[in-house]
Amino acid sequence: MTSQNRACCGNGVGRSNGTPDLVVIGAGSAGFSAVITAAELGAQVTLVGHGTIGGTCVNVGCVPSKTLIRATEALHQARAASRFAGIHARSSLQDWRALIAQKDELVAGLRQAKYIDILPAYNNVAYIEGPARLSDDGVAIDGSLLRPGKIIITTGSAPAMPSIPGIDTIPYLTSTTVMELEALPESMLVIGGGYIGCELAQMLARAGAKVTLVTRRHLLPEAEPEIGEALTGYFRDEGITVRGGLAYRNIRRTERGVALSIEVDGREETLEAETVLVATGRRPNIQAMGLEEAGIALLPNGGIEVDDRMRTSKPGVYAAGDVTGCDQFVYMAAYGAKIAAENALNGDGRRYDATAMPSVVFTDPQVASVGLTEAEARERGLAVKTSALPLEYVPRALAARDTRGLIKLVAEVETDRLLGAHILAPEGSDSIQTAALAIKQGLTVRDLADMIFPYLTTVEGLKLAAQTFEKDVSKLSCCAG
């Protein structure tokens, strides 16, 4: 082995023939979840990493984006303080580079503490650095060959590029490189209305950039339409230009930056800005791994196809996390990888279940969802009923003088069972887990309405939304019912 791919922790030796029980390809959140699970089960494991250890979440995803989002939220809260009588506050971003440096310090600290420093704690784990490729004999890494008992692929994802003519001829930012900007641009086009585009567009606008967000459909197309429509209005209130329902004609470089030609209702327009951020989703990292040659089936979106045991189409090979092309959240990556490791070592007894998977979009207000949307439930042939409660009926929102948002519940008519909960609220992320537990346990909306909730909390809105199925909550006193 070369110095670049030698094992840094443990000896990587497992079974009597000198090979590991398990090789995990990919050293991000999913990979570490698989490795820790397997190590705790007593297996000899080799983890193969390529690039910065820790993967997307800690390095260029969740951690850096959310700290910058929280920072610019502080700016906004000061500017919005006048909603309380007698309060006037000012805020300004004085040093963008200092903010980025603080973010980098946090990222480096968490990467060290939660990834690099963890490996030596397991003497049955070896780490090898280098690009991995599957072969008939095992896993090839820079000329070396490992012949493990089982393999788990956890190589994650990267920003996906849209099919816009000219996109390859201009300098553009992605969700990764925007976190590294040395200076904040005066104006920016954000292409993509999904959760990444929405989060970053609002963060950049609050930092001081003039932002235009464009999307082929509308904001958060997978969410309840009421939520996407309301969020669009809140963005516009903050000065963000939102253009939806359009087609991209081409994009080109100009003397002042970039120009995007769009078509709306048969008319062509040109939108200009200093720079452009491409936020049109993510693609699984499967390049140069020899997957198809190894007989591993892929999905149309490029993800590795797996069954509910996390097995690929090749016996002995499993996959988990973003590389599967579905449920691209760090906690689902860790969950799936844990199942993959247990099944690889103990006989495929565990199933992957995303029925009660919560999701959060860290805009302000936050978008938090779990379970089925109304449209998804109807597509499954279910007879459903819904309730939609504006936040103006939630005492917490009234006390905070911030009634932006709503809560929508989806329930089955026949059984009254809660099927989905969708929250748009400044503190929505901290409330969704209650709904997730309700769905996981098969509770009805009557069960939810009868539960005791603490007063003056956002989560109390779930109770009020459940009561809305049978009552007019505007005629209830505080805490009644």
Image (cartoon, grey):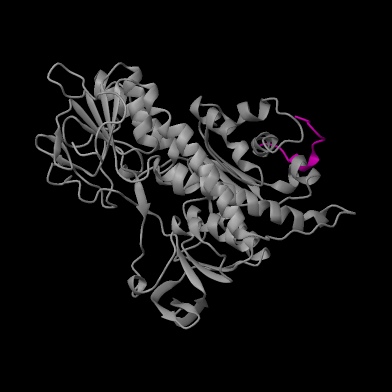
The answer to whether residue 140 is visible is yes
217 to the left or right of 103: left
The quarter of the picture where residue 345 lies is top left
- The furthest residue to the right: 86
Q: Position of residue 351 (x, y in %)?
A: 33, 27
Q: Is 421 or 304 nearer to us in this picture?
A: 304
Residue 358, x across and y down, in percent: 50, 38
Q: Magenta stretch containing residue 127, yes or no?
A: no
Magenta stretch contains residue 476? yes
As rendered, which of 1 and 210 lies closer to the eye?
Answer: 1
Residue sitting at x 31%, y 42%: 155
The N terminus, quarter of image: top left
Residue 161 vertical position relative to residue 17 in the rendered view, above or below? below
Q: Taking 468 as reference, is 357 left or right?
A: left
Give the quadrant of the C terminus. Answer: top right
Q: Which residue is the extreme one toward the front?
A: 3
Please say whether residue 360 is visible from this viewpoint: no
Q: Is residue 318 left or right of residue 410?
A: left
Q: Which residue, as the protein is rendered here, is positioned at the far left? A: 136
Residue sitting at x 34%, y 31%: 337
Q: Is the magenta region chiefly helix, strand or loop?
A: loop
Is 175 rendered above or below residue 55? below
Residue that appears at 51% across and 30% down: 439
Magenta span covers which residues?
Answer: 470-481
Kindly identify the residue that appears in the image at 58 percent across and 61 percent down.
204
Give how far across and how far down residue 390 sits, in percent: 69, 48
User: Residue 38, percent across and down?
Assistant: 31, 22
Number of marks in picture: 0
Residue 335 or residue 72, whichever sits in front: 72
